[in-house]
Image (spheres, rainbow, N blue to C red):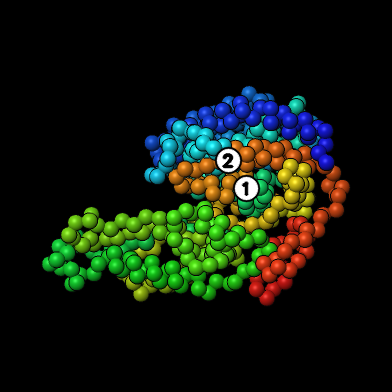
């Protein structure tokens, strides 16, 4: 049953929805691409827009500069003295647009109830859903809410840890992050773990300069072929000895994952486990030669290495170097940054609150999933605030984050607004007022298993936790 006070908030949010969507489209039109120096002013403009919107609604807002010049927007929404504190994290920077869009990525359009624009899903749309929920509360909020939004998440969150460490008065009962996707269109989704990530470059340099492909082809070392062999070895062997991990998370079907990548070939079966529980080596860029009848002396691959649960980034780096040691001196493997895998199952109190909110708004509990993606700020928040963030995704299953035609369905976004309001209400109830619910779910063999909300979701093969 929805309390009357919350019911009034939900009604206000619904009444203001059309106006808020117009404002969201205005924000999405700002091309706040953090990876492109040409958009530095646009990133600042997006930060100022976010700050101004919150100030106009009573929040105290501070723009904290970072060493990369992209401000962290910190907004404190007031509450009654002694109220609990909730931190909401998001980011206002976006990925470069890239080719393949059906409409201009920074001229938002609505087609068939879906917003298409860069940032609609990742992460302006999801963050703005929380802000609209806060705006719908009359007077002061039931909890002090601190909204922390950065402008460099898409480039690894440089400087964010320093800014977070300098903030005073952070004592949250819960930290909420909405930068992930729903399991399906109607099911609230909590992400209980993410893979880690290593960024790297692999360079093959054979010395000298480019040579005639006809006169010397077959006599000189071709760096592109050496690079291909090095990549093959990394892909096949880097995670061959990784410890197998089991998880209580709900597995997405192969078909649902294929729908998220239409037209792309996939590898075997059990795709969700490949994405979430195993490591991977991806190539995001290849540079070699000019395409003429000459053999280059140098070839470079930019790598995106995703780390499975329980892996140590330092161990992965050492193993990669050992695997490629026989290629010396032609091959250089350079790592430029890394984030370990992280477990994000919330504690029992927060788990109970999100369960209560989901039942109230959509009539069903959330499902637990694991993510193959990596949000560096999640680990930073967890370490700095000593609390596991709640990753509650509002994005559609096929939201095309980082791809063309990035999308946010309005129905799902509106449900996110309502769910955010209900969650804030649930987080203000007395701790221990209700028992932690026991959920009953079918496992993948068709049997029924029970577990208490908030239990550690991952265990090593052969080990009980």
**Residue that extends furthest to the front in the rendered view of this protein:** 112
The quarter of the picture where the C terminus appears is: bottom right
Mark positioned earlier in the residue sequence (1 or 2): 1
Tag shown at residue 409: 2
Corner quadrant of residue 424: top right
Question: Residue 356 bears which disc, if any?
Answer: none
How far apart are the two marked residues, 1 and 2, measured between alpha carbons?
9 Å
Q: Which residue is mark 1?
A: 185
Which quarter of the picture shows residue 440? bottom right
Local SS, label 1: loop
Residue 287 occupies which quadrant of the picture? Answer: bottom left
Give the residue displayed 75% in from the left and 46% down from the top.
363
Left or right side of 69 for 378: right
Label 1 neighbour load within 10 Å: few <14, some 14-19, many 20+ = some
Q: Residue at x 72, y 28 (%)?
A: 12
Q: Position of residue 430 (x, y in %)?
A: 85, 44
Label pair 1/2, CB-CB below 8 angstroms: yes
């Amino acid at each position: 049953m929805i309390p009357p006070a919350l019911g009034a908030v939900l009604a206000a949010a619904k009444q203001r929805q059309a106006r808020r969507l117009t404002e969201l489209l205005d924000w999405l039109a700002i091309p706040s691409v953090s990876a492109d120096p040409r958009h530095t002013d646009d990133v600042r403009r997006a930060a100022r827009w976010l700050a101004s919107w919150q100030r106009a609604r009573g929040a105290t807002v501070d723009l904290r500069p970072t060493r990369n010049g992209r401000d962290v927007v910190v907004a404190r929404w007031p509450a009654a003295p002694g109220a609990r504190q909730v931190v909401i994290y998001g980011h206002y920077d976006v990925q470069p647009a890239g080719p393949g869009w059906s409409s201009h990525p920074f001229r938002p359009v609505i087609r068939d109830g879906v917003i298409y624009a860069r940032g609609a899903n990742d992460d302006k749309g999801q963050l703005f859903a929380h802000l609209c929920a806060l705006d719908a509360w009359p007077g002061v909020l039931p909890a002090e809410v601190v909204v922390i939004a950065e402008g460099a998440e898409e480039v690894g969150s440089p400087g964010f840890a320093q800014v977070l460490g300098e903030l005073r008065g952070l004592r949250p009962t819960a930290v909420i992050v909405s930068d992930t996707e729903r399991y399906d269109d109607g099911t609230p989704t909590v992400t209980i773990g993410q893979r880690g990530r290593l960024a790297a470059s692999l360079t093959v340099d054979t010395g000298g300069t480019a040579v005639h492909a006809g006169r010397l082809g077959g006599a000189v070392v071709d760096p592109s072929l050496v690079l291909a062999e090095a990549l093959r070895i990394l892909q096949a062997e880097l995670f061959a000895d990784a410890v197998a991990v089991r998880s209580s998370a709900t597995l997405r079907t192969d078909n649902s994952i294929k729908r998220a990548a239409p037209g792309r070939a996939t590898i075997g079966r059990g795709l969700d486990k490949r994405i979430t529980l195993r490591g991977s080596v991806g190539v995001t860029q290849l540079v070699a030669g000019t395409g003429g009848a000459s053999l280059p002396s140098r070839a470079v691959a930019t790598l995106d290495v995703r780390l499975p649960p329980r892996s140590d980034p330092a161990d992965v780096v050492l193993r990669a170097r050992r695997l490629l040691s026989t290629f010396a001196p032609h091959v250089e493997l350079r790592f430029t940054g890394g984030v370990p895998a992280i477990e994000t199952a919330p504690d029992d109190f927060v788990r109970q609150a999100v369960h209560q909110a989901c039942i109230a708004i959509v009539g069903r509990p959330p499902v637990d999933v694991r993510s193959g993606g990596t949000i560096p700020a999640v680990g930073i928040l967890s370490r700095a605030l000593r609390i596991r963030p709640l990753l509650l995704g509002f994005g559609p299953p096929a939201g095309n984050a980082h791809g063309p035609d990035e999308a946010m369905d309005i129905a799902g976004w509106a449900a996110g607004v309502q769910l955010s309001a209900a969650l804030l209400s649930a987080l203000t109830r007395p701790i221990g007022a209700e028992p932690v619910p026991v959920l009953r779910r079918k496992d993948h063999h068709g049997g029924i298993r029970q577990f208490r909300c908030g239990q550690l979701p991952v265990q090593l093969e052969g080990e009980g936790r």
